[in-house]
Image: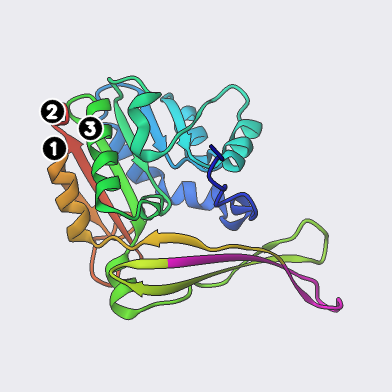
């Protein structure tokens, strides 16, 4: 059987984000939530190139980074040769991971890659069985209540330094709405060379199918899997959630082994 295509193999996502500033901004919430972890063993689900995994390792946690993208895991392992990284999908965590984990993170809009209720149920119920009682689960994704209600189609353009002096890398992120929360997400990476011919050149672009999950949908599915909602925030900086917040951040706890 052919391996599924790597949805994030073309674009340098690691360069899209100013990671030192982001981690500094998110550190207080991460440290507060994980202070309740019943053990130092954590899962970073949808770890990408491993920035959160390495940050938490530096705080003394034993972190396993999990991602379905071979290219993202390659970048993570190159930056952290001694780290624990596993290629796996969110719906099949129990095949490769041991139970007794002290907590889990799923950050960076990872969840919307699961487009069916059955897939999210499998993810949450499988994760519940891997976590110790009382273990925190920190989930962050874009606020799709706002995105769907406003039919938003773009994100702010991100402009980052290029590999060559005088050049910049431009990241565009577009969305096409199909109804019922179904979206086609189209990220694109461009090279901007002022005075060049052409001055703006497409480097890579691709389509990714996503599901925009609303707050009530996620809370219901978490509850079915045995999680209890502790907090709902509007960003990783800790603001209260509202219908216009940039993100949906849920802090949940697993009070008992999952069903």
Q: Tell whether 239 sits left or right of 223.
A: right
Q: Earlier in the sequence, mark 3 or mark 1?
A: 3
Where, quadrant-wise, is the C terminus in this rendering? top left
> Cβ–Cβ below 8 Å for labels 3 and 1?
yes
Q: Which residue is mark 1?
A: 226
Q: What colour scheme governs how the chains and residues are painted in the rendered image of this protein?
A: rainbow
Query: Residue at coordinates 37% horizontally, 39% vertically from top-left?
Result: 90
Residue 128, label in figure: 3
Residue located beneath label 2 in the image: 256
Q: Secondary structure at mark 2?
A: loop
Confirm whether the magenta stretch covers residue 94.
no
Range of magenta residues: 184-202
Look at 55% across and 52% down and name the residue there.
Answer: 7
Q: Are marks 3 and 2 in contact (CB under 8 Å)?
A: no
Pick whichever, 101 or 20, lies toward us.
101
The answer to whether the residue labelled 1 contacts the one labelled 2, judged by CB atoms less than 8 Å apart, is yes
194 in the magenta segment: yes
Residue 168 appears anywhere in the view:
yes
Instruction: Give the percent coordinates (x, y) of residue 227.
Output: 16, 39
- SS at badge 1: loop
Neighbours of disc 2 within 10 Å: few (<14), some (14-19), many (20+)? some
């Amino acid at each position: 059987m052919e391996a599924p295509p790597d949805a994030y193999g073309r674009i340098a996502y690691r360069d899209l984000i100013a990671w030192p500033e982001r981690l500094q901004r998110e550190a207080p919430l991460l440290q507060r939530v994980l202070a309740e972890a019943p053990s130092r063993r954590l899962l970073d689900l949808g770890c990408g190139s491993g920035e959160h995994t390495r940050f938490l390792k530096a705080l003394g946690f034993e972190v396993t980074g999990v991602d379905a993208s071979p290219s993202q895991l390659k970048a993570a392992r190159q930056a952290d040769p001694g780290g624990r990284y596993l290629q796996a999908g969110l719906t099949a965590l129990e095949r490769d991971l041991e139970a007794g984990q002290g907590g889990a993170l799923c950050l960076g809009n990872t969840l919307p890659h699961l487009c069916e209720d059955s897939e999210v149920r499998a993810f949450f119920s499988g994760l519940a069985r891997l976590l110790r009682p009382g273990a925190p689960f920190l989930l962050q994704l874009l606020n799709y209540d706002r995105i769907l209600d406003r039919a938003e189609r773009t994100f702010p353009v991100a402009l980052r330094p290029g590999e060559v002096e005088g050049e910049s890398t431009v990241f565009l992120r577009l969305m096409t709405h199909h109804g019922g929360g179904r979206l086609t997400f189209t990220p694109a990476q461009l090279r901007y060379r002022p005075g060049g011919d052409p001055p703006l050149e497409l480097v890579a672009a691709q389509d990714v199918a996503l599901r925009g999950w609303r707050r009530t949908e996620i809370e219901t599915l978490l509850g079915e899997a045995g999680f209890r909602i502790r907090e709902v925030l509007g960003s990783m900086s800790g603001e209260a959630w509202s219908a216009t917040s940039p993100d949906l951040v849920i802090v949940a706890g697993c009070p008992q082994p999952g069903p």
